Every structure is written in structure tokens, then in C-alpha cells.
Image: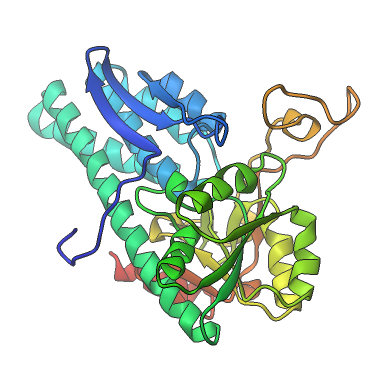
Amino acid sequence: MDDHGIALPLSPALRWENDADGPAVVLLDQTRLPAAETELACRDVPALVAAIQTLAVRGAPLLGIAGAYGVALAAVRGDDVEAAAALLADARPTAVNLAYGVTRALAAYREALGERGDLAAAASVVLEAARELHVEDARAAARMAGHGRGLLRELVPGDGYRLLTHCNTGVLVSGGEGTALGVVLAAHRDGALARLWIDETRPLLQGARLTAWEAARFGMPHTLLADNAAGSLLASGQVDAVLVGADRIAADGSTANKVGTYPLAVLARHHGVPFLVVAPTTTVDLGTPDGGAIHVEQRDAGEVTHLPVAPRTPVAPAGTLAYNPAFDVTPPELITAIVTENGVASPVNGKTLAALVDAGA
């Protein structure tokens, strides 16, 4: 519990360890789920960068935590901390939390080194800064769950919610119990979840592989669907609200999230279904003015032309070109509300969003 009586579970997806083999950022390898729950010990920054780029660790809030621990790892090892921080911050350009975590940890390291001139003492300080960020994110997850649960009560009459989600937004992306899936979990614990609809989330199947794994773990009633079945599902009246996360939120309220989110928002608006984005204020980038200024990561074509699980079987003829943006951008006018740890922005615009960021300053 924190000082406000909020439970603070720390995610099983990441932890710091310093054993006989030395310091490490230990990850639950998300590329192996759900077939195997395998841990990956990253003992230097290049290994952690590789884990970030291959999506062994992913999800905006958790990437921020990983970035902070990565700076600590370089400091504890006695590596070039400035160079390590640059590598980490550039590993995935769209997810603003990664750069935030790196920048925060690096600032703590620089300040400690300047004050004490002692590398070991500075390493200890930056490790503590990473741990603080980890706990803060768990606290933010708990608060988002509370705000989101309250918003569902306002928007959806009665209980027995039927909720649709895209990609993965639970314990695998957070220091706590997640963003959008954390809200779903809160409803489930209240006995208010009738059905969680899970988009498979092409091309890497984060919904099928990860969200379904989490839903089963928590005993949620859930059903998997192909992404392109969401339209007919919404048309049938079997969805009460759509909940998604975000990897970057621009100053005007535009959100970048896993590719497939934007068409889902269009469908939700057409069918009169609330579309909710759940993300901590660390995902808000007031320095990015609007959705057009968000840099969208383009990933390898092989993620589309081959199956995303071993063995990597081709599903398209050799030489086929593929368009593979990792994210798409949803404009604020399609978003019913953005839920943060500081409250809810609705309507979504620069003024309501900035007020929530300022509330946590």
C-alpha cells in the first residue's frame, strides 16, 4: 500500500537484479508468450536495447521503466552512461515514455555525479531513481483504474459491461496492473464485466498472445476476434465501450497507439460507442503539437509476410513488399475521453489535457 492506501503490485514483466553474475534488468520475454514464460536477463545496455527493439519488453509505461533501469545498468557497470542513454532513447522513437524514463534517470545521474564526483554514489542514486519511477507507475496504474471504473459507471448504464480492447495494456506494459486493461480488471473485480472482447492485433498478435494470456490469468470472461471482425461486432450492439492505451499523446489530444486503433475509433464513433484512451500523464508529450507531428515507427516487412511465432513460416510469396507501421494516430474528435492518473479529459482537447498534466506537476 502507498500513503493513500492504494495497492501497488509491481509488474511481473520487469525487475532489477544483482546476483553472482552481476547486475541485470530481468524481463519476462513477451515474444515467447503464451507458449513459454521465459525470463531474459539483460546484463548490458546493448542487450536491453535489442530486447526493446524485438518487443521482448514493450508497452509505453514499461518502456519508460526499462529505460530508467537501463541507465542505472550502465552506471552500475561503469559503462559510458551518456552513450548508453542515447542508445536507449532511440530504441523505439514513437513511445515517449522510453525517452522520459531515460531522461529522468540520466538527470538524476548527472546531478549526483556533479554534487559528489563519485561514480559509485551516482550509480546508487540513478538506481534509486529508476526504482522510484517503477513505484510511481504502479501508483498511477491504480489511480487510472479507479478513474476509468468511475467513468464506465457514468457512460454505461447498469453492470455487465461488454468491453472491446486492442493490443495489450495490462501487467505486461506497466509497473502495476496496466492502463486500459487495468480498468477492465477493476470492473471484473467488481463483478461488472460480462465479456472482454480482444482484438487479435495483427501483425504480431499482442491481443491473442498477451491480452488473452492476462485475461485467463485473472479469470476474466473473454473472447478473441480477428481485427477485421470488430466492425460487425460493434454493429451487432454487443460492445458497450472500447478501451485502448497510447504510446504518445500529442498536445491537442491526438493519440498514437498500436496500428488498428484508428479504424476502431472510427467504427466506435459510427456506432455511438464510447472510445476511451487510458494512459499515464508521462505518455503526454506537450512538445508534440498534434498528431501530424508524431513520428510513427516503421517496422520490418517480415512481421507482415511471416507468421509472428516460431517457426517463422512465410504467408506471402518471397519478395512481397509490406507496409508495416507499428502505430496509427487517432484524432481527439474521435476520443470520448482520455483517462489518466490525475483524472479524465473530456472533451479531449489541448486545454483539458494540459490541465491534467499540470495537476501532477
Where residue 321 sits in the image (x, y, percent)?
Answer: 86, 31
Where residue 238 sits in the image (x, y, percent)?
Answer: 70, 74
User: How many discs appear?
Assistant: 0
Q: Can the viewer see residue 97 in this picture?
A: no
Q: Nearer the viewer, residue 111 or 15?
A: 15
Where residue 333 sits in the image (x, y, percent)?
Answer: 64, 75
Residue furthest to the right: 317
Task: Give the position of the N terminus as an image quadrant.
Answer: bottom left
Q: Nearer the viewer, residue 311 or 305?
A: 311
Residue ID at (60%, 59%) = 222
Residue ID at (45%, 35%) = 89
Answer above or below: position of 334 versus 201.
below
Answer above or below: position of 294 versus 281.
above
Residue furthest to the top: 21
Answer above or below: position of 333 versus 8.
below
Res. 185 image quadrant = bottom left
Residue ID at (54%, 77%) = 160
Where residue 17 sits in the image (x, y, percent)?
Answer: 26, 26
